């Protein structure tokens, strides 16, 4: 043995000896000294030493088992444990002894161990003792006092625990806490088990290798799992850990099923600054995902749905989805029901997130498998009809469809297969899905998502497959499993995935338009878009350049639409789907069977549009396909010779067969419906027939007779169109002249009954006249009149003229005027033929003129064409007459009619050189009619130019329009060319006309002049236009007849109105105010200016202005006028702006300051139009501009906006509101952009002071005030730290607004509260709720959320001022709410100011309104948390003063509310000052006001642990009560008395002498008070005191004497309500005073009162029945308690003198009382019970009376009235029991022992008992009587 080993053994042995010899009381100190070094020897290298130490430890364990109170040096052992990480043996024994004593340490000692335990914990992770030491940490953690979040202590906790220097330990503890949150204890002893979220090793670590008792709270060292989780999470949420460390635990906790745990987790997550864009964090989350339980998986998926970086973990994403949809096992699936729904929702939403955020490369990896999983998920549920049709299942299914679409669109390869499997699957789902009615929305959404994938062009095979698919679903009918149509999606796919020139796509569009009345509107709308090349470009703008839109091959399209030609090559399937049948015939309706016939007319119209469009596009005519292209195309067709020429040329290049097919189809459409036709077919037929070559028309001549039914149709439009077609076809050279003659005769025969025709016959005449006119005129154009029978022609003309002169039918007139015009223009009608018909030309002109003067445009046009019949240009001939009549039409009011007059004049002057006639030529021929009349044309021009200068408004207007028409249709003639300058001047003059149509005509006239003028003219025109526009004043030249105002615009009140200058002069003279002239002229000039400006920019002025240099002063004016309230002005100005400004943005930027300055001036102008326009202009100007541009003007912009917000005109106010909303939107967006935004800071600096000023929220105008408030609320919502400088002012102002914005009817509601079944309390409650839920209050809360210490210092004065000066209840309620918020959520910055506001509350709580007072009292409770001790003591004193000095209950109620709030909301502080608060609380809980009493009772009960707690504060309570008994206020006195009574009652069954000595003075004073409601409680306490404090008054004889006096004194009190209770107390007191005999005193007090109560002579002085009833009850109680007291005073326990002495008097009184009729059953019961008690007690005593008093026994017994059997069973039972006791007392010698008379008495009593028993039926009563008989028989 080495010397070292021997020495160590020796040392160990000595220690062992010391320990073994130590006495038990010395053992603890011995172990504290020697145990740590002894255990250290376990690290010795010598085995013998280690064994010796182990044996010593075994001895110590035995000693400790017998001495459980010994506490070992745990701290030293723990340090030794930490210091020896490599010695397993030392650590094991250290830990063993630590666990043995750690529970015996004080809380502070245990808490001090925590840092030591935590330090180095991470280094022990792999060691076996780590689990034990972590468990030890969990056991000690509850001892740690976790400071309030955000407090200074909280911020220092990490440093205090040393975790700043031990970061790895902090991470280790946080990690294991997160695993602890996941722990679920499994009750099984099987090895290797675990719970979801944990590995086997982790589960064993937390359960100490699976020990069940570890988490069994009933075992000695077991922990409560839920409480431990809550405690550890609270520790984790403290400042001891960082956000990084607590993140996982917070996440896991948030998904816990226990709301207490999840609440902490949610709170930590909300406060966490962790970014889910950290790849490491996301990676860790994905790693643990599969181990988590489903609820946590749901939570994690929701979190990942906010992380873009999570989408890069492609493998994990696929695994997550696969395990969720196709799991390998079912062990960790969510429970069916709500959990599954939440999980699937989160999963699908995450997949959607991935599809939206993921990169292309990542999506290429995850999208294909995910789409497959989703498809399998849907099919596994049952597809297309699901097995589960519940609403929840349907919503998930819908989400799956949407998610599938979202994923598939990200990776085109998923859907771009030649077989289109996914697309087909979705289309089938759409038509057959049977889960819910709304499912189609999701499927359509999925299909829409795929559209961009199939962008044109597609490869041939895929396009062919797609065409077939779309054709199938476009023609699919419901039934046989098809539950809904897929037409919308089909049309949409056709529009997006097929080229515009694809006939299949257009056919699908045609079918969409022909769906019928049941078709969905969106299908029709989509069909229209597909047929419109402009919309097609917009829909496919991402794939097709705007200019690229190849049109369908017209010939092929026509053949496909209207013949059996295959739609898709080599596909009979497609053709059968197209027609619905195999079409071999040539019927144009073959493809439109059944309901498809509705698509026929759209097909015809579409083919016509495409034909004309194709012709224009192949020409050099500039034509832009825009939103208005169809109208432009129609205009070109109708009014442009060049365009018509181009169209004719193009048509000649087309396949003639296709033309014939189309015209045939159009003709068939016209003939449909028995000649009434399909809409648009006839129009298309006539228009194209006017363009096609003559050879093509020849094909239809034989079919002209088929049009006769349509000519006779009852539809006017059909008749007109059919007549034109008839004229084109029937007159063609290919037709037989004889057949033409026959047709003429046939029509003449149909016309002949014109004079008598009505109804359908009249329509027939109308159509026949039209047809005959067109037939004759077209025959003339074809130069075929010579081939036709002249007689037939003459007969027709004669008939026409006859009808024209004589008819009165409006329809016939219309037809005949049209026919005469046609034959006149075509040269069929001549002077000679008129003569042959015996008709004078003058008669015809007169009849036409008469109708023309009525505004009949047909008659006017007919007059113009009739002029071609006449040759001479003399001043007196028919031509002159005709012209004079046309000139005379200037008085017609309808401006539109004058365009017809202009056309007529053009025909008169230019004849067949006028475009009017040339454009009306609708046959392919070379007709040359009468040429122009130069003299007439010159004359006409001169007259019109002269009349345009006239002051006569009607002539001026008409002349302008006529001049325009003349230039439009004859401007190319040299006569017109030579006078263009004069025309320009005339149109310039017309620009100031007030008639809008004249303005537009003049504007367009200028354009026409400009187009045909030379360069010099163009320059002059532009100069004059700009000068007129930018002029500062409007010049108005007038004479007496100048019409300044429209008739009726300025009525005089006498049925007349001011119109001309002469009228103004007259009115001014009548009124005597010559200034009216100037006022009206100014008004008229202004109107002229507006009208002039409105006329600009129309019909080509852009071409004029765009070529000129613009004065910069024009831009501000023009910019404003673009927003004029008048839409016509707006439109004009926009046209000019677009013409002048090539780069709008650059121009505005260049002239920005000038424009804005002009607008800021104009917005406050006199004209409402100017103000309104300026509002809209500023709103448009500032949007999207850099803030720096208008920063210097921002304050002015807001100021003017708010000024006009209170404008007198409603439309201006509306515009100002829009401007304000725009400004608000800009400001809010800037603020939302980020707190660091300089722009936001600058804006707020400019705007916030303004909004908070008298021009904003404090404005007198309600509209301004409301909008400013709304703006501020929006800013607060999104402002963040940017608002910090404005918070002080903002909070104060918002508080005031709470009252300002409250409804105005509140005061009225208070006045009428009773009428509406309301109370003030209810109204106050509603108002309080409204304030708490107000958006203003929410805004205030947001302001408070961003406070810092500096800003808090600035907020305090404003809040203080608001509390002091606020008048309205809502503002005061708001102040109280703000204080609560500051105290709870912002305690760190508010703490220094808590004392100030607590002091302010002393005045605030005294508000007259109860709700306000209660609110401030509640605030005081919260402020008490932060207040200093002195301030809290002050509040306590204030509450007491308020209570004790209160004049009424309201002040006491306030005091109650304050104390209750402090106790409830600052419990810790309340308990700390319990000695101050609780005595007062105990006192006040006896208050007589219900509210006060309830509040104080709650406070007492919630803060005191039992009734005996009163004794803790009895001294203080007594002192307080005694002092209050001296109070001048009776309420306080009475409360003090009740308080003393409660002290006595709560003192238990025995009161010590010390306590009794303290209590008695107070109780004596309380009893001395006069009687009051409730004093009986004090009296009961007095009796209780006498009983429980017997030792006290036995020692103090003076007290005993005084107590007797008090008992008698109280019984003598002259208070009827109090007296019964005083009798009861007197009796109880007399009964417990066994040391004295009080019967005589009691008898003297009570007997007179009883006699008075039963007296029959007592006077009844009340008429109140309720009062009488109450008095009766009190008298009954008086008798009952009086009898009882008498019996109690005959004290059986008092031996000298014997009670028998008083029985005679007692009997006498009882006899007298019971004989009274006023004695109730309760009083009799009292007599029976007291007899039983009295004689039952007497019989138990030893008696030795010398004389016998048997007569007393008989008399007492007789009073029981046993034989009568009267009373209830209970009463009879009591009688029986009393009888038994009297008999027992008799037998026992109470009434004497003498035998004389004894037997007789017993017999007499026996008789009475027997008699009563025989009559008794109740077993219990008979049993009692049997006992009495038995006693008598003994």
Image: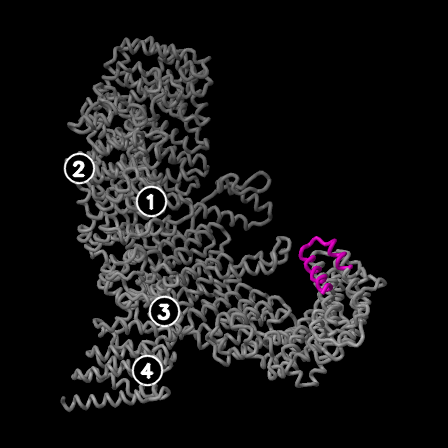
Q: Secondary structure at mark 2?
A: loop
Front: mark 2 or 4: 4
Inspect this view and state whether residue 1193 appears: no
Earlier residue among tags 2 and 4: 4
Residue that label 1 marks = 393
Prevalent SS, magenta region:
helix
Q: Nearest the camera: 1363 or 617?
A: 1363
Inter-mark Cα distance, 2 to 1? 30 Å
Q: Is residue 1171 left or right of residue 1764?
A: left
Expressed as whole percent of the image width and height from the top left, the position of residue 1639 reads 76, 75
Residue under the image location 39 percent in, 29 percent down: 901
Inter-mark Cα distance, 1 to 3? 47 Å
1510 is within the stretch colored magenta: no
Residue that label 4 marks = 63
Expressed as whole percent of the image width and height from the top left, the position of residue 1203 reads 47, 58
**Which residues fall within the magenta stretch?**
1807-1834
Q: Which mark is residue 419?
A: 2
Earlier residue among tags 1 and 3: 3
Q: Are marks 2 and 1 in contact (CB under 8 Å)?
A: no
Earlier residue among tags 2 and 3: 3
Q: Is residue 176 left or right of residue 1497?
A: left
Inter-mark Cα distance, 1 to 4? 69 Å
Q: Residues within 10 Å of mark 4 (few under 14, many from 20)?
A: some
Front: mark 2 or 3: 3
Residue that label 3 marks = 219
- Seen in the picture, residue 901 relative to 1059 is either above or below; the reply is above
Find the residue positioned furthest to the right.
1657
Q: Residues within 10 Å of mark 2 (few under 14, many from 20)?
A: few
Residue under the image location 41 percent in, 40 percent down: 996
């Amino acid at each position: 043995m080495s010397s070292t080993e021997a020495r160590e053994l020796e040392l160990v042995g000595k220690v062992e000896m010391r320990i073994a010899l130590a006495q038990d009381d010395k053992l603890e100190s011995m172990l504290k000294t020697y145990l740590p070094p002894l255990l250290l020897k376990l690290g010795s290298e010598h085995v013998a030493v280690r064994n010796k130490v182990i044996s010593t430890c075994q001895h110590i364990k035995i000693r400790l088992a017998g001495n459980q109170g010994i506490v070992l040096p745990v701290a030293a052992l723990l340090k030794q444990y930490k210091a020896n990480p490599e010695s397993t043996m030392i650590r094991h024994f250290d830990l063993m002894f630590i666990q043995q004593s750690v529970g015996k340490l004080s809380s502070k000692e245990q808490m001090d161990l925590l840092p030591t335990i935590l330090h180095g914990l991470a280094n022990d992770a792999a060691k076996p003792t780590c689990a034990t030491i972590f468990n030890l940490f969990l056991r000690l953690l509850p001892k740690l006092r976790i400071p309030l979040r955000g407090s200074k202590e909280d911020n220092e906790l990490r440093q205090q625990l040393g975790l700043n220097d031990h970061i790895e330990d902090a991470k280790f503890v946080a990690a294991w806490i997160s695993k602890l949150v996941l722990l679920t204890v499994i009750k099984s002893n099987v090895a290797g088990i675990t719970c979801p979220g944990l590995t086997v090793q982790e589960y064993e670590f937390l359960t100490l290798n699976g020990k069940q008792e570890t988490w069994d709270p009933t075992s000695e060292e077991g922990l409560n799992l839920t409480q431990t989780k809550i405690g550890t999470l609270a520790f984790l949420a403290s400042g001891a850990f960082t956000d990084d460390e607590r993140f996982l635990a917070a996440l896991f906790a948030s998904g816990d099923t226990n709301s207490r745990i999840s609440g902490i987790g949610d709170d930590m997550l909300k406060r966490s600054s962790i970014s889910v864009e950290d790849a490491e964090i996301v990676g860790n989350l994905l790693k643990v995902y599969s181990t988590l339980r489903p609820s946590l998986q749901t939570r994690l998926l929701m979190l990942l749905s906010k992380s873009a970086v999570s989408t890069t973990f492609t493998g994990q994403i696929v695994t997550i989805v696969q395990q969720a949809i196709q799991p390998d096992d079912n062990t960790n699936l969510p429970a069916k029901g709500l959990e599954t729904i939440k999980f699937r929702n989160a999963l699908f939403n995450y997949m959607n997130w991935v599809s939206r955020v993921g990169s292309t490369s990542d999506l290429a990896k995850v999208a294909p498998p995910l789409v497959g999983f989703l498809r399998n998920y849907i099919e596994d549920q049952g597809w297309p009809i699901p097995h589960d049709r519940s609403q929840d299942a349907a919503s998930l299914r819908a989400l799956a469809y949407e998610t599938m679409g979202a994923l598939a669109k990200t990776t085109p390869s998923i859907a771009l297969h030649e077989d289109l499997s996914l697309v087909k699957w979705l289309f089938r789902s759409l038509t057959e899905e049977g889960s819910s009615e709304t499912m189609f929305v999701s499927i359509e959404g999925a299909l829409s998502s795929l559209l961009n994938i199939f962008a044109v062009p597609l490869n041939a095979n895929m396009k062919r497959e797609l065409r077939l698919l779309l054709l199938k679903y476009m023609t699919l009918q419901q039934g046989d499993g098809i539950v809904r149509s897929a037409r919308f999606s089909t049309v949409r796919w056709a529009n997006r995935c097929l080229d515009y020139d694809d006939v299949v796509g257009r056919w699908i569009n045609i079918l969409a338009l022909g769906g019928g009345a049941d078709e969905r509107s969106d299908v029709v709308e989509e069909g229209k878009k597909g047929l419109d090349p402009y919309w097609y470009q917009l829909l496919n703008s991402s794939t097709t350049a705007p200019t690229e839109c190849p049109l369908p091959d017209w010939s092929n399209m026509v053949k496909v639409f209207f013949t059996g030609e295959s739609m898709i090559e080599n596909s009979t399937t497609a053709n059968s789907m197209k027609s619905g049948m195999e079409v071999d015939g040539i019927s144009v309706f073959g493809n439109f069977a059944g309901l498809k016939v509705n698509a026929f007319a759209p097909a015809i119209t579409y083919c016509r549009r495409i034909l004309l469009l194709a012709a224009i596009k192949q020409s050099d005519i500039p034509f832009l396909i825009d939103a208005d292209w169809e109208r432009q195309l129609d205009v070109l067709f109708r009014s442009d010779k060049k365009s018509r020429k181009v169209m004719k040329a193009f048509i000649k290049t087309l396949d003639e067969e296709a033309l014939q097919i189309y015209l045939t189809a159009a003709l068939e459409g016209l003939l449909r419906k028995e000649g009434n036709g399909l809409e648009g077919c006839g129009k298309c037929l006539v228009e194209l027939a006017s363009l096609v070559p003559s050879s093509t028309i020849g094909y239809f001549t034989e079919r002209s007779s088929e049009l006769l039914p349509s000519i006779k149709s009852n539809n006017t439009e059909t008749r007109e169109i059919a007549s034109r077609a008839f004229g084109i076809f029937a007159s063609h050279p290919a037709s037989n002249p004889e057949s033409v003659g026959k047709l003429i005769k046939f029509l003449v025969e149909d016309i002949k009954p014109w004079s008598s025709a009505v109804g359908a016959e009249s329509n027939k005449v109308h159509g026949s006249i039209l047809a005959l006119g067109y037939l004759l005129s077209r025959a003339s154009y074809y130069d075929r009149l010579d081939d036709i029978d002249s007689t037939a022609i003459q007969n027709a003309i004669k008939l026409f003229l006859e009808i024209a002169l004589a008819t009165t039918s409006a329809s016939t007139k219309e037809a005949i005027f049209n026919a005469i015009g046609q034959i006149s223009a075509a040269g069929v009608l001549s002077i000679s033929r008129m003569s042959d018909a015996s008709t004078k030309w003058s008669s015809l002109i007169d009849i036409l003129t008469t109708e023309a003067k009525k505004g009949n445009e047909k008659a006017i046009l007919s007059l113009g064409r009739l002029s071609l019949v006449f040759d001479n240009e003399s001043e007196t001939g028919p031509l002159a007459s005709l012209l004079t009549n046309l000139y005379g039409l200037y008085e017609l009011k309808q401006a539109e009619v004058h365009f017809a007059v202009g056309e007529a004049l053009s025909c008169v002057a230019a004849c067949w050189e006028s475009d009017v006639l040339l454009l009306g030529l609708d046959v392919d021929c070379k007709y040359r009619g009468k040429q122009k009349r130069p003299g007439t044309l010159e004359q006409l021009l001169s007259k019109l130019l002269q009349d345009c200068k006239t002051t006569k408004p009607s002539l001026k207007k008409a002349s302008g329009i006529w001049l325009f028409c003349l230039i439009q249709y004859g401007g190319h003639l040299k006569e017109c060319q030579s006078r263009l300058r004069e025309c320009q001047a005339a149109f310039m003059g017309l620009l100031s006309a007030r008639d809008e149509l004249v303005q537009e005509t003049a504007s367009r006239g200028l354009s026409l002049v400009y187009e045909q003028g030379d360069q010099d003219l163009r320059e002059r025109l532009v100069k004059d236009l700009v000068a007129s526009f930018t002029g500062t004043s409007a010049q108005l030249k007038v004479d007496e007849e100048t019409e300044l105002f429209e008739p009726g615009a300025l009525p005089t009140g006498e049925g007349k109105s001011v119109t001309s200058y002469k009228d103004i002069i007259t009115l001014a003279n009548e009124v005597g105010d010559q200034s009216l002239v100037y006022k009206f002229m100014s008004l008229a000039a202004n109107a002229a200016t507006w009208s002039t400006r409105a006329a600009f920019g129309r019909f080509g002025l852009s071409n004029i202005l765009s070529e000129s240099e613009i004065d910069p002063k024009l831009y501000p004016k023009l910019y404003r006028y673009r927003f004029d309230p008048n839409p016509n002005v707006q439109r004009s100005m926009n046209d000019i702006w677009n013409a002048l400004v090539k780069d709008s943005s650059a121009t505005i930027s260049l002239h920005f300051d000038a424009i804005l300055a002009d607008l800021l001036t104009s917005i406050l102008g006199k004209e409402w139009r100017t103000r309104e326009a300026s509002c809209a202009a500023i709103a448009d100007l500032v949007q999207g501009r850099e803030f720096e541009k208008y920063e210097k003007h921002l304050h002015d912009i807001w100021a003017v906006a708010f000024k006009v917000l209170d404008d007198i005109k409603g439309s201006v106010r509306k515009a100002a509101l829009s401007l304000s909303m725009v400004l608000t939107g800009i400001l809010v967006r800037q603020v939302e952009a980020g707190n660091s935004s300089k722009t936001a800071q600058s804006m707020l600096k400019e705007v916030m002071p303004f909004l908070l000023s008298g021009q904003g929220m404090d404005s007198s105008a309600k509209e301004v005030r409301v909008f400013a408030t709304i703006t501020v609320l929006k800013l607060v919502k999104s402002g963040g730290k940017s608002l910090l400088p404005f918070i002080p002012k903002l909070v104060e102002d918002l508080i005031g607004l709470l009252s300002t914005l409250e409804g105005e009817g509140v005061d009225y509601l208070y006045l009428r509260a009773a009428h509406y079944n309301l109370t003030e309390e209810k109204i106050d409650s509603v108002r309080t709720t409204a304030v708490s839920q107000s958006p203003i209050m929410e805004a205030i809360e947001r302001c408070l959320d961003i406070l810092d210490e500096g800003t808090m210092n600035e907020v305090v004065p404003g809040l203080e001022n608001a509390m002091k000066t606020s008048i309205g209840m809502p503002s005061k309620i708001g102040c109280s709410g703000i204080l609560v918020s500051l105290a709870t959520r912002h305690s760190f910055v508010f703490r220094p100011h808590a004392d100030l506001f607590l002091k302010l509350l002393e005045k605030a709580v005294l508000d007259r309104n109860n709700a306000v007072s209660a609110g401030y009292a509640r605030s005081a409770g919260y402020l008490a948390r932060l207040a200093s001790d002195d301030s809290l003591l002050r509040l306590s004193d204030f509450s007491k003063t308020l209570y004790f000095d209160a004049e009424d209950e309201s002040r006491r109620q306030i005091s109650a509310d304050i104390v209750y709030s402090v106790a409830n909301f600052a419990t810790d502080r309340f308990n700390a000052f319990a000695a101050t608060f609780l005595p007062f609380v105990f006192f006040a809980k006896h208050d007589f006001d219900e509210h006060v009493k309830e509040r104080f009772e709650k406070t007492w009960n919630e803060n005191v642990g039992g009734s005996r707690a009163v004794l803790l504060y009895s001294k203080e309570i007594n002192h307080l009560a005694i002092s209050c008994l001296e109070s001048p206020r009776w309420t306080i006195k009475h409360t003090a008395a009740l308080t003393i009574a409660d002290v006595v009652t709560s003192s238990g069954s025995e009161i010590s002498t010390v306590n009794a000595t303290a209590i008695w003075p107070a109780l004596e004073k309380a009893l001395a008070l006069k009687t009051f409601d409730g004093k009986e409680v004090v009296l009961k306490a007095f009796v209780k005191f006498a009983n429980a404090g017997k030792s006290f008054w036995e020692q103090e004889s003076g007290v005993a004497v005084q107590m007797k006096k008090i008992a008698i004194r109280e019984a003598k009190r002259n208070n009827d309500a109090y007296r019964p209770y005083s009798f009861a107390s007197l009796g109880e007191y007399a009964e417990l005073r066994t040391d004295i005999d009080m019967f005589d005193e009691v008898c003297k007090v009570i007997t007179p009162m009883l006699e008075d109560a039963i007296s029959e002579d007592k006077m009844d002085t009340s008429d109140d029945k309720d009062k009488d009833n109450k008095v009766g009850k009190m008298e009954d109680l008086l008798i009952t308690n009086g009898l009882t007291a008498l019996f109690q005073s005959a004290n059986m326990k008092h031996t000298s003198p014997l009670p028998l002495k008083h029985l005679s008097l007692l009997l006498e009184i009882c006899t007298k009382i019971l004989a009274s009729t006023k004695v109730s059953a309760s009083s009799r019961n009292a007599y029976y019970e007291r007899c039983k008690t009295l004689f039952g007690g007497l019989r138990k005593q030893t008696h030795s009376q010398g004389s016998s008093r048997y007569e007393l026994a008989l008399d007492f017994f007789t009073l029981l009235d046993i034989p009568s059997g009267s009373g209830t069973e209970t009463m009879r039972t009591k009688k029986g029991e009393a009888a038994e006791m009297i008999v027992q007392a008799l037998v026992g010698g109470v009434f004497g022992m003498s035998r004389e008379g004894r037997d007789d008495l017993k017999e007499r009593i026996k008789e009475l008992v027997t008699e009563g028993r025989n009559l008794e039926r109740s077993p219990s009563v008979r049993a009692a009587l049997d006992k009495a008989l038995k006693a008598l028989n003994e």
